[in-house]
Each structure stands twice: as structure tokens, then as C-alpha cells.
Amino acid sequence: MLRIATLVTATLIFSHSAYAQEVIKVSRAEYAADVSNSADCTDKLGQLCDGKSRCVVKATNSLCGDPKDGIVKTLTVEFSCGKTGKQVSARENSNATLNCQ
């Protein structure tokens, strides 16, 4: 007697919106002492953080220059996680954590 075995496979399909991890997209980043003394860090932060779900950046003069010597600066980053806009700030020598998790 000949037996034929049938292999049954199942395919799981996950909804992209329910299971996909959102990632960072930097839209604006500025390292500033005040309104008239600032450095645009958008490209630099984009290179460091875009496409990641979490990114930690230390706000220092080495990040994108020193816009005003002797004055404490603040790094402000505007970014999105999918359709959700977010903003984070960090004072000089502190960490800014961009998080889509």
C-alpha cells in the first residue's frame, strides 16, 4: 500500500502598520546659544540618526561647531516617527535621545 504525505504550509502576513517599527527622520536640528548665534545641524543629525528607531547624540561643539564661544548652547532636534512629529532638546554636554520605540 502506497501512502502519500501532504505537506501543508502556512504563510503569515502581518499588517505593515501594526508591526513595522517606525524610524527617525530628522527635519530640523539647531545648536544655538541664542537666536542670532546658532549652527544648522540638520544634515549631520540626519546622517547620524535617520532610519534608526532610537538615536542618542551628545550635544557638543564637535557636533557642528561652536556658534558662540564661552556661552552654553542647546541642541534642538525636530524629527518624525512615521507621521508623528517630535522634538527633543539637550543642553551642551548632555545627551539628546531621539526615540521612535
Image (cartoon, rainbow, N blue to C red):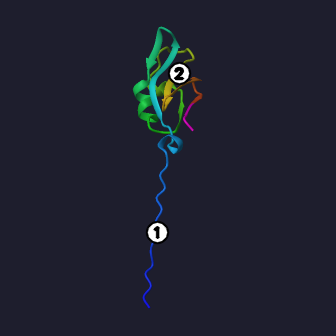
Image coordinates of residue 2 in percent, x first then y, are: 42, 88
Q: Which residue corresponds to the image point at 54% horizontal and 27% vertical from the top-left? A: 59
The answer to whether residue 100 is magenta is yes
Q: Which residue corresponds to the image point at 54% horizontal and 35% vertical from the top-left? A: 100
The residue beneath circle 2 is 76
Query: In this picture, which residue range is highlighted in magenta?
Result: 97-101
The answer to whether residue 10 is above or below residue 48 is below
In this figure, what is the number of numbered marks? Answer: 2
The type of residue carrying mark 2 is: Thr
Residue with the most extreme top position: 36
The type of residue carrying mark 1 is: Val
Image coordinates of residue 86 in percent, x first then y, are: 54, 25
Q: Quadrant of the C terminus?
A: top right
Q: Which residue corresponds to the image point at 47% horizontal and 15% vertical from the top-left? A: 38
Image coordinates of residue 6 in percent, x first then y, are: 44, 75
Q: In terms of depth relative to the viewer, which is nearer, 36 or 62?
A: 36
The answer to whether residue 14 is above or below residue 31 is below
Q: Look at discs 2 and 1 and give the one toward the viewer.
A: 1
SS state under label 2: strand
Q: Main secondary structure of the magenta part?
A: strand
The residue beneath circle 1 is 8
Q: Between marks 2 and 1, how big is the CA–CA gap?
A: 54 Å
Image coordinates of residue 32 in percent, x first then y, are: 51, 16
Q: Earlier in the sequence, mark 2 or mark 1?
A: 1
The answer to whether residue 58 is above or below residue 72 is below
